[in-house]
Image (spheres, rainbow, N blue to C red):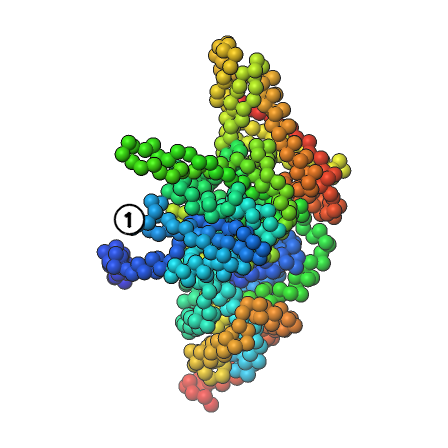
Amino acid sequence: MRRKRKWIATLIAITLFLLLGEFLPEEPLRSKAMVVGFGIDYPKDQTVSIHLQILTGSGNKTETRSNTRMLSAEGSTLGEAAYKISRESGLSVSFTHCNVVLIGESLLKSPVLYATLNYLVSSAYLSDNACLIACQGSAGDYLSAPVGFGENAGIYIREIIGMYDRFGDIVGTTVRKYVVDYHRLGQTVWIPFMTKKAIDPIIPTPSSDKKEDDYLFEMNKVAVLTKDRFIGIWEENGTVGINCLLNKISKAQFRSDGDHGEKIDWYVLKNKSDLRYDLEKKTVTAELKLQALVKEIIDYSGNSAHVDRLTVTDSEIARLESMLTDLITSFYLETQSKNADVFGFCEAFFDRYPRRAKDLPLSEIKLDLSVKVQLT
Amino acid sequence: MNDVNGKQLSVMIFFIPLIFKMSMLPSYLHRTSGVDGYIIVGLFALAEFLQLWAVLFVCERGGMNGIRERYGNVVYLLLSCPLLLVIGVKSILFVTEIVNYLTTFLFYNVIDAPIVLSLLLVCFYFATKGARSIARIFELTLWLLPVILLMGLIFGETTLQGEYLLSVFAGGGSSILTAIGKYLVYTFDFSPLLFCNIKVKRKIGIGIFSLFSILVTMGCYMLFYCRYGRASYLMGCAFARLASFDTVITEVGSLDWISCILWVTTAILNLSLKLNAVAEISTGFRLKRHWGVGLFTLLLAFLLLKVWVNVDKAFTMASSGIQYVVFGIEVALPFIMIILYSHPQKKEPVCAVNVNGSPR
């Protein structure tokens, strides 16, 4: 009897909730500025400029097509700038749904990057799993840019970088990972670096007016920093090196030359890296295994015999392996010469040999890399 | 009112040592002991369960009520009053931790007073309902754990750096002593169970849950350090951070909200169990349970609003010399009770009865 009453009470509660749910007050959500993209610039000394891409909700015809609006403010702290936006908009700023943090070039190259981002992790206003991306120029320009695809810049960036995937030449990182890497022994961090390019707007009809350009974002670069020092920006060798050795790639494409000069396009399905640390030799032996398939072959000499085949030769596989070895090794040597421990070797040696490897300088650590490509 | 069965006890001994070790302590431990923290917390938990077995041994013989029946109210008060200090110190620390957790993860930029008062009101209510109700809620709350794990398995994207755990005791074993000197107050939490009437049929379940609790505590620390590496010392509210499973807030919402519910509920229940002990102690002063716990809660509220107003101040107080007093009481009390129980009970004077059944 008691159980029956409980079931009846539960059913009534659920029914009431479903039927009367629409009468619940909506004010709290409307009074909040839900931030979906967060940009930070460092325009002048001791001043940060923040740009918030705020969801305005659907159905309002006067808003932009993306249902988002961008607000910017300056302040000596992030909190001060956010408060200004809150005061001007009459809305309480909420970062709980913000998944993208964009860093302008001025902040990236300044010595205050860590100090700025540390607040975001320790305060828990923002998810520490939010994607972190640096960009050329001002972060505000990117967040307010009309994008070619996706509803708005914030969502578009998330789609490119892949919420769950890492592409061969697009590295992804989060605010948390940035702070964690900053505290490693080598104190070296990397952040994907984004540029933008204008494309024609949606194909106009004869009656429509000329519209402004839309933009596409390219993210195939990586910025490297040590402690509070900007080291540089690398293209393919940086992104491929980081993704192949440190990350799990879900999709990657590489191109190499065939035996007769033809162009071979490879599609990588899986990578596995095995790093071994030898303190006596001060060497990291890295074995990178890639599972790949040949996607496309083009021979520009016009010889169809080189194209009409279903497999590749051992020497062509070796050429790809050699190309990748050179690519990754050159990145390591370049960053090593700038004392940037991108791959975290100092920390890895210390973790394995805590007493003997604490002061092992990066300049003495050699990388012995071998790449093995396995065809599927 | 304070009857707890074996199943409920198992759930309680799983949660009690775990809850307040999963908030600020992981970062505190990392600050002083680095990655050794996960070994140290395992040692803490292991030692804590030695106290548990002593407590259970006493409970089997009647617990605190048994002492009152055997030796009278004065001995009962002599033994239980020092626990007021223990409960007071720990409650101050733990309430500030809950408030810190709530103001970090749930409500931003709010003053503490309403939260402190609401928390204490809930704890007061549970305490007046007795250990049986608290144990029942503990039992129900346990089901949130598989939900968290299931959500994590489905949506989680956790990447862990296991090598961060390798460099244990890089500076020798001195980190253990440093940790004991600072964080002893976070251990030995089982003495409120002395006031419960525990009915255990099979002890194997308790053994399994004790071991499970130690492993889960160590496991959570390992995951936390794998995730945050050397930056672990910056990260408070460890459980909520872990339970987000590296996901960002997406269409499925935020994964850490379930962990917030679990942690806050179990933390409140843990505090309520302590206040339930206060209610029982107050009966020794001829006070009704709700009056005793009410007065204690009011005093606690005053101290939390006027003296130890934040987690830093509370931690400074709790980790000072007073922690050794607290530790001493927690450890000594069950053993004193064992000695008292081992003393043969005085035989009741037997009246000679005549054949007619009336005393001569």
What residue is at 38 percent from the left and 50 percent from the top? A69
Which residue, given by chain and number where applicable, does mark 1 sit on?
A61
- Image location (x, y in percent) of residue A359: 74, 47
- Specify the subunit that label 1 lies on: A
In this view, the residue in front, A142 or A193, is A142
On screen, B167 above or below A239? below
- Image location (x, y in percent) of residue B34: 65, 55
- Image location (x, y in percent) of residue A169: 53, 33
Q: In the rendered view, does A27 fall on the left or right side of B149?
A: left
On screen, A104 above or below A274? below
Residue furthest out toward the bottom:
B360
SS state under label 1 = loop
- Determine crowd level at label 1: few under 14, some 14-19, many 20+ residues with C-alpha closer than 10 A: few
- Image location (x, y in percent) of residue A22: 25, 56
On screen, B249 above or below B178? above
In this view, the residue in front, A65 or B124, is A65
Which corner quadrant of the image does residue B55 belong to?
A: bottom right
Q: Is residue B287 visible?
A: yes
Quadrant containing the N terminus of chain B is: bottom left
What residue is at 59 percent from the left and 64 percent from the top? B187
What amino acid is found at the position of numbered circle 1 in the picture? Lys
What residue is at 38 percent from the left and 47 percent from the top? B251
Q: In the rendered view, does A35 fall on the left or right side of B28?
A: left
Q: Is residue B205 visible?
A: no
